[in-house]
Amino acid sequence: MNLSGKGKAGKVDCQAYAHTCQTAGIRAYPTVKFYLYQRAKVNITLNMIHTNHDLRTSMGQTQV
């Protein structure tokens, strides 16, 4: 598996966004998740997204 190249990072407040963390399978923290590019999905490295706005901004989506 080749992991060279650029990556993106973010963070999530699991107390404020418990459903997001539960969906991602995060049961304890700190937790680092890696998501590999798969064409239909966003290529990001998840390191706890602080807010949904920060996540949308990091992906270039400013509208809900």
Image: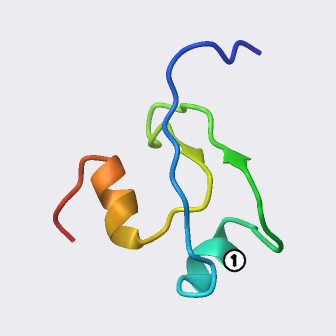
State whether residue 56 is above or below residue 59: below
Q: In x, y percent, where is residue 16?
A: 53, 87
Graded by Cα atoms within 10 Å as few (under 14), some (14 to 19) or many (20 or more), the crowding at tag 1 reads few
Q: Tell me which residue sits at (83%, 72%) in the image.
A: 28
Residue in view at x 73 percent, y 51 percent: 32
- The residue closer to the viewer here, 61 or 50, is 50
**Amino acid residing under circle 1:** Gln
Image vertical order of residue 60 relative to residue 4, above or below: below
Q: Is residue 46 above or below residue 7?
A: below
Residue 5: image location, x then y, percent: 54, 15
58 with respect to 31 (left or right): left
* Res 62 → quadrant: bottom left
Look at mark 1 in the image and give the residue it sits on: 22
In this picture, is 7 found above or below 47?
above
Residue 36's spot in the image, x, y percent?
A: 62, 33
Report whether 7 appears left or right of 4. Answer: left
Farthest residue toward the left? 63
Q: Secondary structure at mark 1?
A: helix
**Quarter of the image with the N terminus in it:** top right
Image location (x, y in percent) of residue 40: 44, 39
Judged left or right of residue 58, residue 10 is right
Picture quadrant of residue 29? bottom right
Q: Foreground: 17 or 40?
A: 17
Quadrant of the drawing holding the C terminus: bottom left
